[in-house]
Image: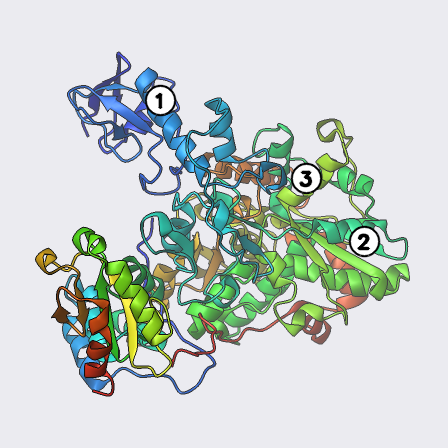
Amino acid sequence: MAEAKAKKPEASGGEAPLRLTPELVAFIDEWREKPGNLIMVLHKVQSVYRYIPRTIAFEVAERLGIPLAKIYGVVTFYHLFKLQQPGRHQIAVCMGTACYLKGGQDLIQEFENLLGVGLNTVSADGEFSVESVRCVGCCGLAPVLTVDGETFGKVTKEQLPDILAKYRGA
Amino acid sequence: MKKIKLEINGIDVAVEPGASILEAAEQVNVRIPRLCFHPDLPAWAACGICVVQVEGLSKMLRACATPAEEGMRIVTHNPEIYQVRKSVIELILSTHPNDCLQCPRNGNCELQQLAADFGIREVSYEHRVAELPVDDTTNAIILNPEKCVKCGRCAIVCQQMQGVWALEFLGRGEHTRIAPTADVSLGDSPCIKCGQCSAHCPVGAIYEKSDAQRVWRALQDPEVFTAVQIAPAVRVAIGEAFGFEPGELLTGKTYTALRRLGFDAVFDTNFAADLTIMEEAAEFVERFAHGHGELPLISSCCPAWTDYMEKFAPDFIPNFSTAKSPHAMCGAMAKTYFAEKRGIDPARIFMVSVMPCTAKKFEISRSEEMFASGHQDVDVSITTRELARMIKACGMDFPNLPDEDCDSILGGYSGAGTIFGATGGVMEAALRTAAHLVTRRELEDVNFMDVRGLEGVKEARVEVAGKEVRVAVAHWMANIETVLDRVRAARRAGTELPYHFIEVMACRGGCVGGGGQPYGADDDVRRRRAAGLYKDDATSAKRCSHLNPYVQQLYAEFLGAPLSAKAHRLLHTDYRPRPTYRFEDASV
């Protein structure tokens, strides 16, 4: 069985594509020969764009000398990686056992009422997207949600408009 | 190396180090039930049906992925193991559509066979089939992910055997699916249409796009003149669908069956393979002896390979033989030379090619050169599997059909034409004629044994008129990069080229192992099919393309000489770089 060779992917069509930033190029070059580099690079890419844009995935594949398919295999395996651009502020509602029992689903429903869109969809103004996550590790504060990594505990649905207001336009 | 001794079902066996329990069990005449395992591929241990018990271990082990160890005492079957396997099969069936009667794999599905062997009469689990769309965006292969059992064979074949990476495992857990990546369809993916995924799929999740209905319609239309041609590799494999052993040479019966299906003319792609060699050998001599054109010359009769090259190795476009593949040449000759001679309007001719290949379905309209006659030169390409079904649907007693001859003037072939169907065959055929072109003498020994066989990359040095010709033969696509990289390295270093002539076929074993051949091919089957072709060659009256009297007649009456302007117009094509992925990027 021959070793799979790196394939140079090329895209055709489309508008002017997103390109890797010089910072990302330098990061990829630094990691190119290191084991486990793909996950590290994808984390970095997502920290810049908040998701993994398709044209960027092509460039990463080319720079790392790996097939594009491998990148998608990894990106779709881990829930953390996103292929669609999320809202400017990312809300994560915990649906671990404790939060689930304490009404996590009610929070998700209320966000849908307030934002007009359900889970994993960006609100019309591009400000927010809501996802449900498994245990964030502070069950004593259930129900819990995070916005851009900031944690809110013992949340009631009445508090949600204030929480959104804090981030909207910020 | 010292053999490993173990005990299977109380019987002592000894195996080579590294052998799996599954392989060891074959020595005690046990074929452990399996679904995901395939001898071409590394064990993936996805399905869990091949579990066995090992003394001293409480959990069962998967026989495909567990190496035999010294002193192991293994039980391959007992009521407990039977029950576990049966549960696994039921679990798979619980997520699998129940439409076996309409399935393209009805009658030769590996899951259906397991369910039959285990006497599954009911499934204890809720029946839940994920709703996923069918991808029929190529004109060769169809993906139906609802049927997928996630054995992984197709993805591993596509990635490791073929080096294409058109398919990948996406998602995880019960949502895992196998599909092209980057949100593109198969038609916009790097897929080269070789169909090895379909040849390895145990169920009906990946299969050839059937064009048999179009053939039936043409056969029914009295206004249409139906012509058909069969590829070299078809004649040594079609018998498998009718109980023959692999490799049984059934040229005459296949001609008879085609005629009785209603075809007005029965041609043979082997004839056109001789024609391809006339052009390709002339091209080689032009480049090798006269310095006109790039070396190494690279064979181009495999459409999956040309697709691969255009996508992944466009730097080799100038090296490609511009000679069309045999079936394309046959189509062009049928609608020009044959039509003229027989006084038939070429617009009335419907040309069907029966191929061991799924990529031929793509090739027949891949570029404008495929319309050289002024019409589509080959109207429909069907696989060996599709032809076998057509013959069965007619109720023909294929094994007892008499042998008939094909129709001249596009039928008679030499031994060189027939070996096109095996890896190394194009090279050998070309060398036979190239030697003649240079020396104007016939070879005493036409056998080039070094280029035969199933090794992934074969290299040889042969002498033609006192000059050394270095050749390489690669098959099963992932092997080609090694060969190309050697050429690239020599170019960069400015050193002498490692090869003058390279033959590539995308499928393991060449066309005998093609993606459209009867199911169940492994290396043993490929070897036997190839042996059938080499026997056909060895017993042929003429063994070199240039000695084929019909080919000589074609040049004398119609084409002039190899590489003439007319030959170029009708028998040659060209290549262009193509993107691996095609999409409109809406996400930017």
Residue B20 image point, x, y percent: 28, 31
Marked residue chain, label 1: B
Mark 3 to mark 2 CA distance (whole Å): 17 Å
Q: Nearer the viewer, residue B182 or B432?
A: B182
Quick check: do tags 1 and 2 share a chain? yes
**Residue B543 visible:** no
Q: Which tag, 3 or 2, sits closer to the chain's start?
A: 2
Direction from residue B210 to residue A168 in the image, left or right:
left
Q: Give coordinates of residue B399: x percent, y percent.
A: 70, 28
Disc 1 vs disc 3: which is toward the camera?
A: 1
Q: Is residue A112 left or right of residue B6?
A: right
Q: Residues within 10 Å of mark 2 (few under 14, many from 20)?
A: many
Mark 2 secondary-structure assignment: helix
Specify whether B155 is left or right of A95.
Answer: right
Q: Nearer the viewer, residue A37 or A153?
A: A153
Residue that carries the numbered disc 2 in the rendered image: B218
Disc 1 versus disc 3: distance between alpha carbons? 36 Å
- Residue identified by numbered label 1: B83
The kind of residue tagged 1 is Gln
- Amino acid type, residue under disc 2 in the picture: Ala
Give the CA separation, mark 1 to mark 2.
Answer: 51 Å
Front tag of 1 and 2: 1
Q: Secondary structure at mark 3?
A: helix
**Quarter of the rendering occupied by the C terminus of chain A:** bottom left
The residue wearing badge 3 is B389
Circles 1 and 3 on the same subunit: yes
Viewer-proximal residue, A121 or B134? A121
Chain to which the residue tagged by mark 3 belongs: B
